[in-house]
Amino acid sequence: MNFHEGEFIYINKPYRMTSFGALAFVRTRLSKKLGVKRLKTGHAGTLDPLATGVLILCTGKATKKIESLQLQSKEYTATLQLGATTPSYDREHTVDMTYPTKHITRELIEQVLHQFEGDIMQVPPLFSAVMVDGYRAYKLARKGADVELQAKPIHIDEIELTDFNPETMQMSIRVACGKGTYIRSLARDIGAALGSGAFLTALCRTRLGDKRIEDCLTLDGFNEWLETVDTEDEMPAKAKA
């Protein structure tokens, strides 16, 4: 492998680690193996800290392809807790509102989910990296600023109910979608469409483009994998200095 010329590394990002944290973990070890101070790296398609799954890391000249990788379709599995909401639409924050759920049935859920397939408008989460007047929305939200985000067009290819427990009021879905889709916002909107509330309790990106979670390395196994890799890299003159 030639990491300076450009390689793709597919990681199953662990729970509670940022995408940048996963990138830094890999970059540090690659740089050490190659004997350089800092190997050029980047990642395609940010995952929230509370999400797991496919994260594509690019090295060297392959970082030029990050934008095109982000345009590829994605697939997620998610678990939603019905009957409540949180400010972040996931478990990062505690419940702020509760709602009735006695009327919710599997039939109602399946009927509602179809409303979200195709081209739709979606308001991003307030606690997100969306830029607002030059600032990240989540930074403004943490300061208590009154921020109103605008709805953006997204595309959902398919959404499927994979499980529903009427006792715990938890449901699981599989979502195939395009760039810019926030599954946290989708959970919020599904809850509202059901005449209740909802927030994410689990989220995993199972596919990005044609790469599936089964193709990914774990960070726990990364060092062992790296030891088996033969490199063709020639250290650039600037890196040697």
Image (spheres, rainbow, N blue to C red):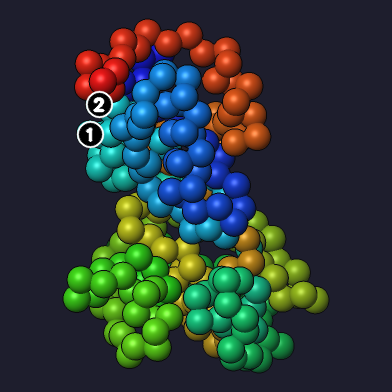
- Along the line of sight, which residue is nearer the eye, 124 or 229? 229
- Along the line of sight, which residue is nearer the eye, 53 or 162? 53
Residue at the image point whose x is 50% and y is 29% from the top: 29
Q: Quadrant of residue 73?
A: top left
Q: Helix, strand, or loop for circle 2? A: helix
Residue at the image point whose x is 59% and y is 91% from the top: 97
Judge the density around disc 2: few (<14), some (14-19), many (≥20) Cα neighbours within 10 Å.
Answer: some
Q: Is residue 79 left or right of residue 123?
A: right
Judge the density around disc 1: few (<14), some (14-19), many (≥20) Cα neighbours within 10 Å.
Answer: few
Number of callouts: 2
Task: Check the image and report above or below for 46 versus 35.
Answer: below
The residue positioned farthest toward the right in the image shown: 167
Give the quadrant of the C terminus.
top left
Q: Amino acid at mark 2?
A: Lys
- Along the line of sight, which residue is nearer the eye, 194 or 126? 126
Task: Check the image and report above or below for 37 versus 204.
Answer: above
Q: Is residue 102 left or right of residue 126?
A: right
Q: Quadrant of residue 130?
A: bottom left
| Residue to which mark 2 is pinned | 61
Residue at the image point whose x is 31% and y is 62% from the top: 154
Q: Is residue 90 left or right of residue 37?
A: right
**Where is residue 11 shown, x and y percent of the image?**
52, 36
| Residue to which mark 1 is pinned | 64
**Where is residue 78 shown, x and y percent of the image?**
59, 59
Q: Quadrant of residue 125?
A: bottom left
Q: Is residue 129 left or right of residue 228?
A: left
Give the quadrant of the N terminus.
top left
Mark 2 touching mark 1, by CB under 8 A?
yes
- Along the line of sight, which residue is nearer the eye, 197 or 37? 37
Residue at the image point whose x is 55% and y is 32% from the top: 216
